[in-house]
């Protein structure tokens, strides 16, 4: 499933140069974005980056100041929320407290004028979908947080929208329940064949659930890519730093050949990289490398192309891995992580030891912005 890599595929949802201003504040700035049918798409960004505003414009609660939003080729301007094939699920589940689970799910269907027999059938189907058959006659206060969340989900898909919008859907759940619910959401999306657009500020959540992620900052999309691409090939310092941990070696390109480049840092340290991309000689760049791509050893590695010396500054044991912080001689602190399963048990490195870090020329990416 990768319609975005097929140049023939037609986007299902299309934002075209969308800008939204509140007074003289620009919440969304000339943003263009395509989402495909049946995609699980995540908008990820810090608080205030404009992700909810984008979702609200798609739902019809806000109109863009300029630009267009198309759904299956149709311009949505002027179409009220209830006439869009889009439904929104909110973080605060907003269930009716005096109504049973059944009645909560049936509510929207009744309003649409569906017959009683059809409503009963649909409600039963929805209860089964979210595995709450046995809880049909309970009131929301007689349910756990996770169960309430599933009622809200059932209610928001009961009308069979084409697109489900979820604004921080798991925000109110504790960590363990969140993780379980992430998989439930993914199953549900598959089963129903809907397009999901989820807003979150939780990178792990986005990485787990989404087919693709748009990383947003200050009303703009910084990068749209699959979770693996975002992690392995971030396109900017911002994206590299936003998702996962990263080490950035700042410097300028001293030499450039067809694929490789030599980068000289401020302190004179040299780094040789492959796949230097757009970086041209003289450019100020950052070499971005993830902690697990860095080796650490007590002696200078014989065959390493890139090796830098420093001292062990801190060691953090995290259960599945151990993180070493090495303070290089130029003062930069580098984070190197090692899976404990792969670790040599009698590793001699400890606090304040001299240590070498090393990495392969293709272990990171060169960033020009
Ligand atoms: P959060 O995760 O905190 O919800 P967000 O990325 O979803 O953040 P938005 O809710 O889209 O952010 O808001 C983006 C910016 O627009 C914020 O700075 C917010 O204060 C501003 N904003 C949103 N709605 C309005 C409004 N109705 N009037 C004025 N400013 C608004």
Image (cartoon, rainbow, N blue to C red):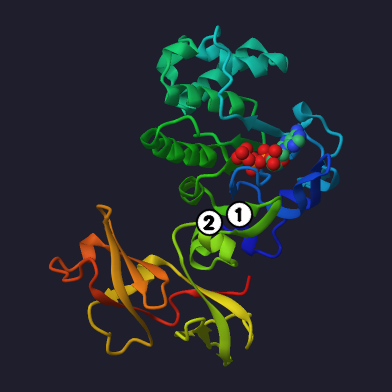
From the image, which quarter does the C terminus lie in? bottom right
Residue reaching furthest to the left? 346
Instruction: Give the x, y percent position of residue 235.
Output: 59, 67
Kindly indicate the quadrant of the structure image that contains residue 332: bottom left
Q: Which mark is residue 242?
A: 2
Instruction: Give the x, y percent position of residue 343.
Output: 21, 66
Q: Is residue 148 left or right of residue 44?
A: left
- Asked if labels 2 and 1 touch by Cβ distance under 8 angstroms, the answer is yes
- Residues under labels 1 and 2: Cα distance? 8 Å
Kindly indicate the quadrant of the structure image that contains residue 51: top right
Residue at the image position 43 percent from the left and 40 percent from the top: 183
Mark 1: few/some/many CA within 10 Å (<14, 14-19, 20+) = many
Instruction: Give the x, y percent position of residue 143.
Output: 42, 16
Write down the residue under mark 1: 215
From the image, which quarter does the N terminus lie in? bottom right
Q: Quadrant of ligand 1?
A: top right
Q: Earlier in the sequence, mark 1 or mark 2?
A: 1
Whether residue 59 is visible here, answered yes or no, is no
Residue at the image position 49 percent from the left and 14 percent from the top: 140
Whether residue 288 is visible here, answered yes or no, is yes
Q: Is residue 208 above or below residue 155?
A: below
Instruction: Give the x, y percent position of residue 14.
Output: 75, 50
């Amino acid at each position: 499933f990768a319609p975005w890599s097929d140049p023939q595929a037609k986007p299902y949802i299309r934002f075209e140069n969308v800008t939204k201003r509140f007074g003289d504040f620009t919440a969304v700035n000339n943003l263009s974005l395509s989402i495909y049918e049946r995609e699980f798409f995540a908008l990820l960004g810090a608080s205030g980056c404009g992700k909810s505003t984008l979702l609200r414009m798609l739902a019809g609660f806000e109109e863009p100041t300029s630009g267009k939003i198309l759904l299956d080729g149709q311009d949505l301007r002027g179409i009220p929320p209830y006439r869009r094939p889009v439904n929104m699920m909110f973080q605060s589940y907003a269930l009716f407290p005096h109504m049973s689970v059944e009645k909560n799910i049936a509510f929207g269907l009744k309003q649409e004028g569906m017959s009683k027999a059809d409503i009963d059938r649909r409600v039963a189907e929805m209860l089964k979908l979210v595995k709450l058959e046995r809880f049909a006659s309970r009131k929301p206060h007689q349910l756990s947080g996770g169960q309430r969340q599933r009622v809200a989900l059932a209610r928001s898909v009961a009308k069979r929208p084409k697109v489900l919008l979820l604004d921080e859907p798991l925000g109110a759940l504790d960590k363990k329940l969140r993780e379980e619910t992430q998989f439930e959401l993914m199953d549900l999306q598959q089963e129903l064949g809907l397009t999901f657009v989820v807003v979150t500020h939780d990178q792990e959540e986005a990485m787990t659930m989404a087919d693709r992620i748009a990383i947003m900052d200050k009303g703009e999309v910084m990068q749209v890519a699959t979770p693996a691409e975002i992690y392995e090939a971030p396109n900017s310092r911002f994206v590299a730093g936003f998702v996962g941990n990263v080490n950035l070696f700042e410097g300028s390109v001293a030499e450039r050949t067809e694929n490789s480049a030599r980068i000289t840092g401020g302190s004179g340290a040299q780094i040789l990289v492959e796949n230097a991309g757009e970086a041209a000689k003289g450019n100020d760049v950052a070499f971005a490398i993830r902690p697990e791509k860095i080796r650490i050893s007590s002696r200078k590695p014989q065959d390493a192309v890139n090796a830098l010396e420093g001292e062990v500054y801190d060691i953090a044991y995290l259960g599945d891995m151990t993180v070493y912080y090495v303070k290089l001689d130029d003062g930069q602190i580098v984070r190197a992580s090692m899976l404990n399963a792969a670790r040599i048990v009698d590793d001699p490195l400890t606090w304040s030891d001299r240590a070498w870090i090393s990495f392969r020329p293709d272990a990171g990416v060169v960033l020009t912005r």
